[in-house]
Image (cartoon, helix red, strand yellow):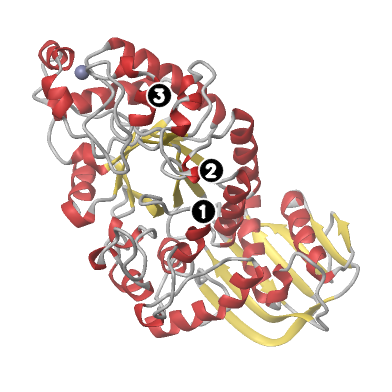
């Protein structure tokens, strides 16, 4: 099955005839759909220059948003899109389903419909067809590392727009790192005045004010995207600990590192918990979504093993070792957030070994396929935790198509490898698998201007795996469809890179 839409819909039946959009077209909704109808009008107006008439009743000519009858059994994000010569009908059970129908409908028009200025196209036509569509997973995430490199608010919003087009619904925002603390916390001003500029590069300095955060969360919400903040603890915290060295094991500000170090938040010091709980109070105020990500990856225990307070905590709490101490630390924070009705996501590192049981509001994000294969996936399921599949092979889009900087050959891959070999692309996922993630880390100075060419076009393979239900296209057919999107990417101002190793010219620059 071929269509002009990516990710591919579940079912497309093309018929004869076309719907031609004309000036003064009527767009109508009944009880639900006002928000999406207005969104569609704003998109169509810019490029066509047409005027539109809004009505709130059933119509025979124009574009109609219709709430689905219960017997249609359409899930929250599912939709039915019917194009006939006189009428386009969008049927869904909620605004979000209607929103995804609009994302599909726009892709059926001439691609110039995505332009931000009026285009001189003679015929704004859509081929008659019926589309039935729904996502494979409820959780479809894009992660951006704003910790190692800072990106502007405009850049983040631009990516939220792209995510909506790709029908992704979670923006996982990695806000803290050894190289920078990026979010204003009123109670602890040094986190940003000191922690946001511990690294050397110009693009590595900066932070988001609480006003910026609210603006981004609201913008995301208008596109049906939930923002999940990540406060990575106890490791990857050198920037915060430079600002507040009293929370390290030896009260000493650590060196800033690009990767990670054993300078962790001291888990034996009760003041650490007070500090982090106060931070989380402000985080929960700013992010109304269901989830908070607390990291938990790559925390070597050298300092904890030598720290009197940490070792004492292990004895007092009857823990086995320093790994178990991290589970105790994670459990305390997860329980704190449980009282605020939040679920907590940790990276897979927390389930590699046996130890203290984590509470039932913990979700595990499986990432380290390169070193641990599917250990995190299996162990999380065994312990009854929900899982997000985001294995570094092949969901880390910062791994370029060909080697660059410290990314050697074994940390490169292309569109075909993602499409055919991604371990996270599970054929019959366990019911505990909540969804998938795509990630863009910014280590080794992946600056703002280098991100598009890493993310695009390869993210199309990942969103196909997150969204599409049913039989897949062959790779060659899929790649042909991706290439048809290059014109759209150009119109959107996306500086897309090569898809395949064989497409990379000798003079191509990843930076
Ligand atoms: Zn300690």
Residue placed under numbered mark 2 in the picture: 226
**Quadrant housing the C terminus:** bottom left
Q: Is residue 18 visible?
A: yes
Which sits earlier in the primary sequence, circle 2 or circle 1? 2
Q: CA distance from mark 2 to mark 3?
A: 18 Å
Kindly report which numbered mark, 1 or 3, lies closer to the viewer in this rendering: 1
In this image, 430 relative to 454: left or right? left
Q: Residue drawn 82% across and 64% down?
A: 45
In this image, 229 relative to 256: left or right? right
Q: Residue drawn 44% across and 28% down?
A: 195
In this image, 222 relative to 472: left or right? right
Secondary structure of residue under mark 1: helix
Percent coordinates x, y for residue 493 in the rendering: 63, 66
- Image position of 167 with respect to 123: above or below: above
Residue placed under numbered mark 1 in the picture: 448
User: Quarter of the image holding residue 120?
Assistant: bottom right
Secondary structure of residue under mark 2: strand
Q: Residue drawn 32% across and 11% down?
A: 271
Residues packed near mark 1 inside 10 Å, few (<14), some (14 to 19) or many (20 plus): some
Q: Is residue 373 visible?
A: no
Percent coordinates x, y for residue 56 in the rendering: 84, 54
Ligand 1 within 8 angstroms of badge 3 C-beta: no
Proximity of marks 2 and 3: CB atoms separated by less than 8 Å: no
Q: Which mark is residue 337?
A: 3
Kindly report which numbered mark, 2 or 1, lies closer to the viewer in this rendering: 1
Q: Which mark is residue 98?
A: none
Which sits earlier in the primary sequence, circle 1 or circle 3? 3
């Amino acid at each position: 099955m071929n269509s002009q839409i990516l990710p591919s819909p579940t079912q497309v039946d093309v018929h004869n005839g076309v719907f031609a959009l004309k000036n003064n077209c009527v767009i109508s909704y009944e009880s639900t759909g006002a928000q999406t109808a207005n969104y569609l009008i704003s998109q169509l107006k810019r490029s066509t220059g047409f005027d539109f008439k809004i009505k709130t009743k059933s119509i025979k000519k124009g574009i109609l948003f219709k709430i689905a009858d219960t017997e249609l059994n359409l899930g929250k994000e599912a939709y039915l899109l019917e194009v006939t010569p006189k009428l386009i009908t969008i049927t869904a059970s909620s605004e979000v389903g209607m929103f995804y129908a609009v994302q599909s409908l726009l892709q059926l028009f001439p691609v110039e419909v995505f332009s931000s200025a009026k285009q001189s196209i003679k015929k704004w036509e859509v081929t008659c067809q019926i589309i039935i569509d729904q996502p494979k997973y409820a959780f479809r995430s894009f992660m951006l590392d704003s910790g190692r490199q800072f990106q502007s608010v405009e850049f983040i919003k631009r990516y939220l727009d792209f995510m909506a087009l790709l029908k992704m619904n979670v923006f996982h925002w990695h806000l803290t790192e050894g190289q920078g603390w990026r979010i204003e916390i009123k109670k602890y001003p040094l986190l940003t005045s000191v922690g946001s500029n511990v690294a050397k590069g110009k693009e590595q300095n900066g932070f988001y004010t609480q006003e910026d955060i609210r603006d981004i969360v609201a913008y995301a919400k208008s596109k049906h995207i939930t923002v999940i903040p990540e406060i990575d603890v106890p490791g990857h915290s050198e920037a915060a600990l430079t600002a507040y060295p009293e929370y390290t094991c030896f009260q000493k500000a650590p060196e800033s590192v690009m990767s990670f170090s054993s300078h962790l938040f001291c888990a034996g010091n009760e003041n650490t918990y007070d500090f982090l709980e106060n931070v989380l109070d402000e985080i929960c105020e700013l992010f109304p979504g269901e989830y908070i990500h607390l990291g938990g990856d790559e925390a070597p225990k050298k300092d904890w093993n030598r720290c009197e307070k940490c070792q004492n905590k292990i004895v007092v709490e009857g823990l086995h070792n320093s790994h178990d101490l991290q589970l105790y630390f994670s459990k305390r924070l997860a329980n704190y957030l449980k009282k605020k009705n939040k679920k907590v996501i940790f990276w897979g590192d927390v389930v590699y070994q046996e130890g203290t049981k984590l509470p039932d509001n913990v979700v595990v994000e499986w990432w380290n396929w390169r070193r641990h294969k599917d250990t995190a996936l299996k162990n999380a399921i065994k312990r009854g935790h929900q899982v997000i599949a985001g294995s570094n092979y092949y969901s880390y889009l910062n791994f370029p198509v060909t080697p660059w900087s410290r990314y050697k050959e074994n940390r490169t891959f292309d569109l075909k490898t993602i499409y055919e070999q991604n371990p996270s692309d599970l054929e019959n996922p366990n019911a505990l698998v909540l969804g998938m993630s795509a990630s863009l880390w910014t280590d080794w100075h992946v600056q703002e201007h280098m991100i598009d060419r890493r993310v695009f076009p390869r993210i199309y393979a990942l969103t196909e795996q997150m969204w599409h239900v049913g039989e897949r296209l062959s790779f060659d057919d899929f790649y042909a469809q991706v290439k048809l999107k290059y014109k759209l990417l150009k119109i959107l101002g996306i500086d897309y890179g090569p898809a395949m190793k064989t497409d990379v010219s000798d003079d191509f620059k990843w930076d």
